[in-house]
Amino acid sequence: MAYHYTSVFGSLFWGVPAREVFPRLSGVTAYGALGVQLFFIISGFVILMSAYGRTVGQFAASRISRLFPAYWAACILAAFLLLVVTDGEMNKVTWTDAVVNLTMLQQSLGVRSLDGVFWTLWVELLFYLTVALFLWRGMTYQRLLAFVFLWPLLGMLSLQGDSKLLQTLLMPDFSPLFAVGMGLYLIHSHGHDLVRWLAVGVNAVLASHQTADRFLPGMSQSTGHQLSPEVTWLVILGFVAVVALVTTTPLRHAGWKWMSIAGALTYPLYLVHEMWGWWIIRSLHGAVGAWPSVAVALGSSLLMAWLIHRFIERRFAGKLNRALLASLSPAPLTAEGPERRAQPPAAGASRSLQDQLR
């Protein structure tokens, strides 16, 4: 949020580049863009943990019910802001774009996202697909350990070719981050081991390199600051160290109630803070100044996140999960099932209908 409010672009909502409003702070908060990398490391750990011992249907139901209720709410709010309140001034999207965004597949179709932060959800979906394929083929420890090593390596090799499809599926820019989280989960669940820590270490190096080499230039361009590759390496390695400490050491047993509440709000807050925060800053900063407008944007985003969590996620996520489980789980055969299938179809039924009944 600090990155989006005090460093990135700025002309859209401050009227001038953000670095002119916050000349010293923006050079530091520019590195806040790397929060995405921390998100992917945590996701590698959490998603693998949620997939263990589940069927593909159970995994799909849990992920859909976790992501989509808050996402749909965020899409509706963003569409209202962009198409009704600002009439396309902040993001040139259409009503049809808004409808396509509800699928979360807009990036694959070349459709503009309602909110810039939505791009990470496409990366997440590709990671979920990878995990689902693992579940379908059989998720074993040996296969997972091999995958943690091989997936990022294949991603690096895909950069040597011209296949955009292969690069999209293998995600060379982000697969090492997910793999770090997966490796830490293997340590968390199976204990400390040289090979497991080697998997984490190798991927931490790959993740740091890919971020500094391929992600950092875009950060520099969007903020107007010449950001340091060395600092980027330190940040990524620091993320790995922090996640390792809270998942593989006695710190994993520590926690406070407020952390659960904060954790519950992070996803809806991520979804709504950018466009709504920018609009609030644009509307207020001329009258109240820079810092008060940022404070109001922050408070308003937190309030919207809490409302989405309280009235959307808590009310509908469980119901959606149960409905999906009922749909995705195979229906058990009844006692009379075989006898019913043995009976001939009604007279006059077509051959295709007979085949369908069988």
Image: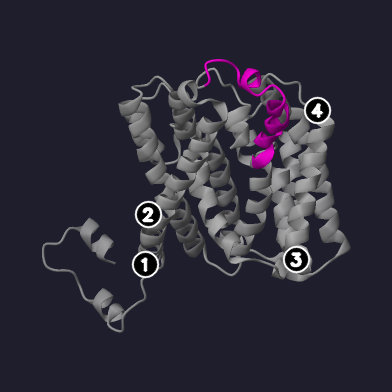
Q: What separation in Å lies between label 1 and label 3 (alpha carbons)?
A: 38 Å
Mark 1 burial class by Cα count in 10 Å: few <14, some 14-19, many 20+: some
Q: Disc 1 on helix, strand or loop?
A: helix
Above or below residue 218? Residue 240 is below
Which amino acid type corresponds to the residue marked 2 in the rendered image? Ile
Mark 1 and mark 2 residues within 8 Å of each other at the beta carbon: no
Using residue 350 as the reference point, say whether residue 129 is left or right of it.
Answer: right
Q: Of all residues shown, which one is farthest toward the top?
A: 16
In this figure, which residue is indicated by the disc labeled 2? Answer: 312
Quadrant of res 304: top left
Q: Which residues are magenta?
A: 14-35
Q: Earlier in the sequence, mark 4 or mark 1?
A: 4
Q: Disc 2 on helix, strand or loop?
A: helix
In this figure, which residue is indicated by the disc labeled 1? Answer: 326
**Where does the image place residue 201, in percent across and percent down from the top left?**
84, 50
**Where does the image place residue 146, in percent across and percent down from the top left?**
76, 56
Circle number at residue 251:
3
Using residue 38 as the reference point, say whether residue 312 is left or right of it.
Answer: left
In this figure, which residue is indicated by the disc labeled 4? Answer: 228
Which amino acid type corresponds to the residue marked 3 in the rendered image? Leu
Residue 11 in magenta stretch = no
Mark 2 burial class by Cα count in 10 Å: few <14, some 14-19, many 20+: some
Q: Disc 4 on helix, strand or loop?
A: loop
Residue at position x 71%, y 54% in the image? 181
